[in-house]
Amino acid sequence: MTRCSAAHPDDPTACGGPVAVTVLDAKGAGVSGCEHHAARLLASLDGGRVYPLPDAPAGAALRVFTAADALRPFCWDTTTPRTRPEQLSRAEARAARDA
Protein backbone atom coordinates (compact mmCIF):
# COMPACT_ATOMS: atom_id res chain seq x y z
CA MET A 1 0.00 0.00 0.00
CA THR A 2 1.50 3.31 -1.07
CA ARG A 3 0.77 6.32 1.09
CA CYS A 4 1.33 10.01 0.47
CA SER A 5 4.62 11.70 1.31
CA ALA A 6 3.08 13.49 4.31
CA ALA A 7 2.36 10.20 6.11
CA HIS A 8 4.71 9.62 9.06
CA PRO A 9 6.27 6.12 9.02
CA ASP A 10 4.84 5.40 12.49
CA ASP A 11 1.33 6.59 11.60
CA PRO A 12 -0.70 3.47 10.74
CA THR A 13 -3.61 5.27 9.08
CA ALA A 14 -4.48 5.15 5.40
CA CYS A 15 -4.60 8.20 3.16
CA GLY A 16 -7.79 10.22 3.13
CA GLY A 17 -8.17 11.13 -0.50
CA PRO A 18 -5.83 12.39 -3.19
CA VAL A 19 -2.68 14.45 -2.67
CA ALA A 20 -4.12 17.95 -2.41
CA VAL A 21 -1.87 20.21 -0.32
CA THR A 22 1.73 21.01 0.52
CA VAL A 23 2.82 21.43 4.14
CA LEU A 24 5.87 23.62 4.76
CA ASP A 25 7.89 23.67 7.96
CA ALA A 26 9.23 26.86 9.57
CA LYS A 27 12.34 26.76 7.33
CA GLY A 28 10.36 26.29 4.10
CA ALA A 29 10.98 22.59 3.52
CA GLY A 30 7.81 20.99 2.24
CA VAL A 31 6.01 17.80 1.42
CA SER A 32 2.75 17.21 -0.42
CA GLY A 33 0.07 14.92 0.90
CA CYS A 34 -3.55 14.02 1.35
CA GLU A 35 -5.68 16.18 3.63
CA HIS A 36 -5.67 13.53 6.38
CA HIS A 37 -1.91 13.10 6.67
CA ALA A 38 -1.21 16.77 5.96
CA ALA A 39 -3.34 17.74 8.97
CA ARG A 40 -1.54 15.22 11.18
CA LEU A 41 1.83 16.51 9.96
CA LEU A 42 0.86 20.16 10.38
CA ALA A 43 -0.30 19.47 13.95
CA SER A 44 3.16 18.09 14.72
CA LEU A 45 5.09 21.11 13.39
CA ASP A 46 5.89 24.42 15.05
CA GLY A 47 5.48 27.23 12.55
CA GLY A 48 4.14 25.03 9.77
CA ARG A 49 2.02 26.31 6.89
CA VAL A 50 -0.28 24.64 4.39
CA TYR A 51 -0.96 25.54 0.76
CA PRO A 52 -3.33 23.95 -1.75
CA LEU A 53 -1.94 22.34 -4.88
CA PRO A 54 -3.25 23.84 -8.15
CA ASP A 55 -5.74 21.01 -8.70
CA ALA A 56 -6.83 20.70 -5.06
CA PRO A 57 -10.51 20.56 -4.17
CA ALA A 58 -11.87 23.92 -3.02
CA GLY A 59 -11.11 24.57 0.64
CA ALA A 60 -8.52 21.78 1.01
CA ALA A 61 -5.91 23.92 2.77
CA LEU A 62 -8.51 25.42 5.11
CA ARG A 63 -9.80 21.95 6.03
CA VAL A 64 -6.25 20.80 6.77
CA PHE A 65 -5.51 23.90 8.87
CA THR A 66 -8.75 23.51 10.84
CA ALA A 67 -8.24 19.79 11.42
CA ALA A 68 -4.64 20.31 12.54
CA ASP A 69 -5.79 22.79 15.18
CA ALA A 70 -7.74 20.03 16.95
CA LEU A 71 -5.08 17.29 16.61
CA ARG A 72 -2.37 16.62 19.14
CA PRO A 73 1.20 16.49 17.84
CA PHE A 74 2.15 12.96 16.78
CA CYS A 75 -1.45 11.91 17.44
CA TRP A 76 -0.73 8.31 16.42
CA ASP A 77 1.44 7.97 19.55
CA THR A 78 -1.15 6.95 22.12
CA THR A 79 1.34 5.74 24.74
CA THR A 80 2.87 9.10 25.65
CA PRO A 81 1.12 11.02 28.45
CA ARG A 82 -0.06 14.44 27.26
CA THR A 83 0.38 16.87 30.15
CA ARG A 84 2.57 19.71 28.90
CA PRO A 85 1.13 22.48 26.70
CA GLU A 86 3.29 21.52 23.70
CA GLN A 87 1.87 17.98 23.87
CA LEU A 88 -1.72 19.18 23.51
CA SER A 89 -3.54 20.26 20.39
CA ARG A 90 -3.40 23.96 19.67
CA ALA A 91 -7.11 24.19 20.53
CA GLU A 92 -6.54 22.44 23.87
CA ALA A 93 -3.56 24.68 24.66
CA ARG A 94 -5.62 27.81 23.87
CA ALA A 95 -8.47 26.61 26.07
CA ALA A 96 -6.08 25.91 28.95
CA ARG A 97 -4.48 29.36 28.61
CA ASP A 98 -7.87 31.08 28.51
CA ALA A 99 -9.25 29.18 31.53
Image: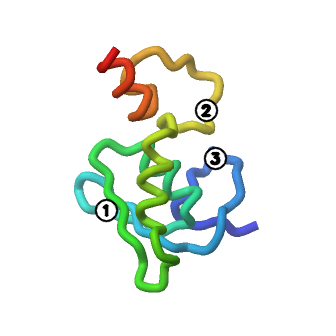
Pointer 2: what residue?
Answer: 77
Q: Is residue 59 above or below residue 49?
A: below
Pointer 1: what residue?
Answer: 29
Disc with the residue nearer the chain's start (1 vs 2): 1
Rendered location of residue 92, percent (x, y): 43, 27
Rendered location of residue 58, percent (x, y): 47, 75
Tag 2, which secondary structure? loop
Disc with the residue nearer the chain's start (3 vs 1): 3
Report the Cα–Cα distance between label 3 and label 1. 20 Å
Report the Cα–Cα distance between label 1 and label 2. 24 Å
Q: Residue at x 42, y 61 (%)?
A: 62
Tag 3, which secondary structure? loop
Residue farthest right in this picture: 1
Query: Residue 10: which disc?
Result: none
Report the Cα–Cα distance between label 3 and label 2. 8 Å
Q: Residue at x 33, y 60 (%)?
A: 24
Pointer 3: what residue?
Answer: 11
Q: Is residue 42 above or below residue 63?
A: above
- Amino acid residing under circle 3: Asp
Q: Quadrant of the N terminus?
A: bottom right
